[in-house]
Image: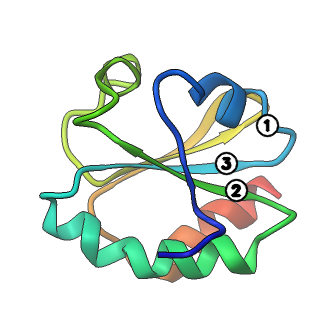
Amino acid sequence: MSQAVIHASDADFDATVLASSEPVLVDFWAPWCGPCRMIAPALDELAGEYAGRAKVVKIDIDQNRATALKYHVRSIPMLLLFKDGQVQATQIGAVGKPVLAQMIDKAL
């Protein structure tokens, strides 16, 4: 797992994501989710490639139910791109690295 990927919780979500001056790609996931594990390497790579320009944050929905409920997470993986504290884009389901990179690029 990449050191560049930030693991957020209900307690620090607002400070880590909503207050960020950079765009933030948030991956709502769970350890038991196969497709979540499938996209994890792409997220690790993106976190490194966009370091200093954008953040990649993972939030475990089993451990952080309040945040998952707040953003109406019904199926995972669900990726939300935040900019200036607002959701700019949503992607549900496992997709390739180019799709995720495009989400970040649009926000930069």
Query: Mark 1: which amino acid?
Result: Ser
Q: In the rendered view, would you say 16 is above or below 1? A: above
Q: Secondary structure at mark 3?
A: strand
On the picture, is 24 further left or further right than 84? left
Place of residue 75 in the rendered image (x, y in percent of width and height, measured from the top left): 19, 43
Q: Few, some or many C-alpha atoms within 10 Å of disc 2 (few <14, some 14-19, many ≥20)? A: many
Tell me the CA gap for discs 2 and 3. Answer: 5 Å
Disc 1 secondary structure class: loop
The Cα atoms of the two marked residues, 3 and 1, are separated by 7 Å
The reply to whether discs 3 and 1 touch (Cβ–Cβ < 8 Å) is: yes
Tell me the residue that label 3 is attached to. 24
In the rendered view, would you say 56 is above or below 20?
Answer: below
Disc 3 residue type? Val
The residue at 76%/58% (across/down) is: 54
Q: Is residue 82 above or below residue 7?
A: above
**Residue 12 in the figure: left or right of residue 34:** right
Residue ID for mark 2: 55
Q: Dots 2 and 3: beta carbons under 8 Å?
A: yes
